[in-house]
Amino acid sequence: MLGGLTIARMAIVCHCEVVRERTIVKAVQRGATTLAEVQAACGAATRCGGCEPAVRELLQRAGAPADTHVHIRPAFGLSA
Ligand code: FES
């Protein structure tokens, strides 16, 4: 523990947007229940998508209902 936070809570989950676990947990505590709501709240999982499974796991651990939406991103360099 460091200043009341565990190492896991300080860990960066989304490296593209530099979002820590504690920020995602805070978003859930403030009412985010879906991946889209977490994305809007803190930007996690909005770029490469590599962290999306971890964000979904955090949502489920926090008791949010399973988000079954499929999120498809355009390849880098292409606009939607
Ligand atoms: S690591 Fe989160 S969007 Fe790339």
Image (cartoon, rainbow, N blue to C red):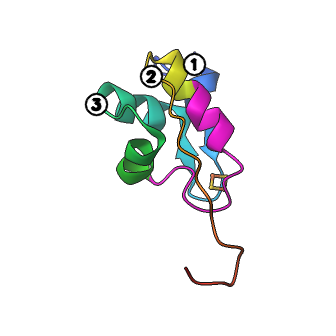
Query: Would residue 51 be counted in the magenta stretch?
Result: yes
Give amino acid for label 3: Gly
Please give the label number shown on residue 31. Answer: 3
Please give the label number shown on residue 65. Answer: 2
For residue 11, say whether it is visible: no
CB of mark 3 near ligand 1 (< 8 Å): no
Query: Would residue 27 be counted in the magenta stretch?
Result: no
Residue at disc 2, secondary structure: loop
Q: How many angstroms separate mark 2 from mark 3 (CA)?
A: 12 Å
Q: Earlier in the sequence, mark 2 or mark 3?
A: 3
Question: Principal SS element in the magenta part?
Answer: loop
Q: Earlier in the sequence, mark 1 or mark 2?
A: 1
Q: Closer to the observer: label 2 or label 3?
A: 2
Q: Residue at x 58, y 15 (%)?
A: 1
| Callout 3–callout 1 Cβ contact below 8 Å | no
Q: How many angstroms separate mark 1 from mark 2 (CA)?
A: 25 Å
Q: Earlier in the sequence, mark 3 or mark 1?
A: 1
Q: Is residue 39 left or right of residue 69?
A: left
Q: Residue at x 45, y 50 (%)?
A: 39
Q: Residue at x 46, y 16 (%)?
A: 4
Residue at disc 3, secondary structure: loop
For residue 35, say whether it is visible: yes
